[in-house]
């Protein structure tokens, strides 16, 4: 269990209000996805294909590389139905000039509510 995420037990349906930042992030992400779609030129096709996906980004932050990775692992354990599509790693400036923090960003999706299938590509080993 992550030290930053308290264990909470609840019975029945739980409704969590979305903070304004989440709503703003979603609007920004949809705007960025629309811009990416508009950037695809129909005239210059090279035989390949381009797809734009708006996956949910889960950002886990820690004061050390190990802590950030532990937070990402804790989140994955708490959301076993999530499918991780990609992972990005960053060392960024922290709250002071001489301090850095580490971020692990997971691009994830959840199963479709009707079909139960995951959307998007995932890595599959050779058969």
Image (tube, rainbow, N blue to C red):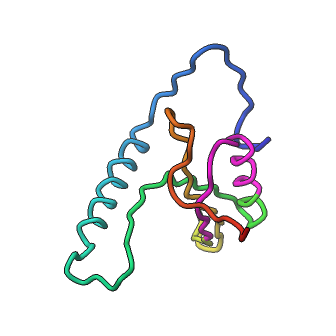
Magenta stretch? 70-89
Q: Quadrant of residue 29?
A: bottom left
Q: Residue at x 62, y 72 (%)?
A: 91
Looking at the image, how many numbered discs can be counted on the residues?
Answer: 0
Instruction: Look at the picture and state if 67 lies above or below 127.
Output: above
Give whichever of 53, 29 is nearer the camera.
53
Residue farthest along the left direction in this orientation: 43
Instruction: Look at the picture and state if 85 lies above or below 111.
Output: below
Q: Quadrant of residue 47?
A: bottom left
Residue farthest along the top direction in this orientation: 12
Residue farthest along the front direction in this orientation: 127
**In which quadrant of the rendered image does the N terminus lie?**
top right
Q: Is residue 72 magenta?
A: yes
Q: Is 24 on the left-hand or right-hand side of 121?
A: left
Give whichever of 20, 48 is nearer the camera.
48
Give whichever of 9, 98 is nearer the camera.
9
Q: Is 103 on the left-hand or right-hand side of 112?
A: right
Q: Estimate the x, y position of residue 42 in percent, counting from the top left.
A: 22, 75
**In which quadrant of the rendered image does the C terminus lie?**
bottom right
Q: Is 2 on the left-hand or right-hand side of 56?
A: right
Q: Residue at x 29, y 56 (%)?
A: 31
Q: Estimate the x, y position of residue 60 in percent, counting from the top left.
A: 63, 55
Q: Estimate the x, y position of residue 120 in percent, counting from the top left.
A: 51, 56
Give whichever of 24, 11 is nearer the camera.
11
Q: Estimate the x, y position of residue 64 in percent, counting from the top left.
A: 74, 65
Q: Is residue 99 magenta?
A: no
Q: Residue at x 74, y 53 (%)?
A: 73
């Amino acid at each position: 269990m992550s030290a930053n995420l308290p264990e909470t037990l609840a019975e029945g349906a739980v409704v969590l209000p979305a903070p304004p930042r989440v709503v703003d992030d979603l609007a920004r992400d949809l705007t960025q996805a629309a811009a990416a779609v508009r950037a695809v030129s129909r005239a210059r096709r090279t035989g390949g294909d381009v797809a734009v996906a708006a996956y949910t980004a889960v950002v886990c932050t820690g004061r050390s590389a190990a802590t950030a990775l532990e937070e990402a692992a804790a989140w994955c354990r708490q959301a076993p139905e999530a499918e991780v599509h990609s992972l990005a790693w960053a060392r960024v400036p922290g709250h002071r000039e001489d301090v850095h923090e580490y971020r692990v960003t997971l691009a994830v999706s959840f199963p479709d509510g009707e079909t139960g299938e995951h959307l998007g590509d995932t890595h599959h080993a050779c058969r």
